[in-house]
Image: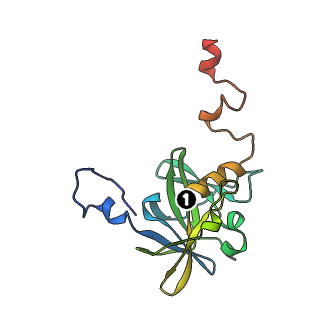
Amino acid sequence: MLDHNHNPGSPQGSPAAEFENKHCVFQLGDSQFALIATAVREITYAPPLVRVPQCPPSLAGICHIRSEFVPAVLLGPLLGNEASTSQEPEQLLVLSSPRGSWALMIDRVIAIDSIQTHVDAGNRSDSQLTPVLGTATYRSVVTRVLDPGVLHRLIQQSRPSQWNPAGDLEHAGTTTYQQRIMA
């Protein structure tokens, strides 16, 4: 498990500082991917999933990790054939975002290491969200480097419109109990 407890006064050799310029390299099917290591909260085996009716294909289900319900996401529907796998992924990369934790289903973690990313400027546009930031070569294998922020936004956009986090109630045209009382 990764621990990203960071103490601003800690020396350069602290656990958080050691992950700053590293990526978590992982395998899904025949493809290799990487995410910036500081985006990964932990790596764990996939617990049993509860399938959610009428969910987008990218949501494999909801799982329970350390007293928290976490959506487990499949990369295949978000990236296309380059992330397809013939078997159920066995591990989860649990990531944190301002809206809570979520997890990517993967086959296995290969390493947490420094990689040289070649950013593809053609993939970066304001009009289209592209989760592939660029490529790198790790142990002689082409590795697609993913942008966890864009992945999270794509997941948020694909959720059914009736699923609104508590913080979005005002924007969804409904009011909270407290807002009704205050009116």
Can you give x and y, in whole percent of width and height, for residue 63 in the image? Answer: 58, 55
Q: Residue furthest right?
A: 54
Classify 128 as above or below 108.
Answer: above
Residue at image position (36%, 56%) is: 4
Q: Is residue 45 left or right of residue 127?
A: left
Residue at image position (31%, 53%) is: 6
The quadrant in which the C terminus is found is top right
Which residue is tagged 1? 148
Residue 22 appears in the picture as rendered: yes
Residue 40 appears in the picture as rendered: no
Q: Is residue 172 left or right of residue 37?
A: right
Residue at image position (75%, 42%) is: 161
Q: Nearer the viewer, residue 161 or 121?
A: 121
Classify 144 as above or below 56.
Answer: below
Can you give x and y, in whole percent of width and height, for residue 1 in the image? Answer: 40, 63
Residue at image position (78%, 50%) is: 54
Name the colouring of the figure.
Answer: rainbow
Can you give x and y, in whole percent of width and height, for residue 143 in the image? Answer: 55, 77
Q: Quadrant of residue 125?
A: bottom right
Classify 154 as above or below 21.
Answer: above
Label 1 secondary element: helix
Q: Is residue 7 left or right of residue 31?
A: left
Q: Residue furthest front?
A: 121
Characterize the local packing of mark 1: few (<14), some (14-19) or many (20 or more) Cα atoms within 10 angstroms.
many
Q: Nearer the viewer, residue 132 or 163?
A: 132
Q: Residue furthest bottom?
A: 140
Q: Amino acid at mark 1?
A: Pro
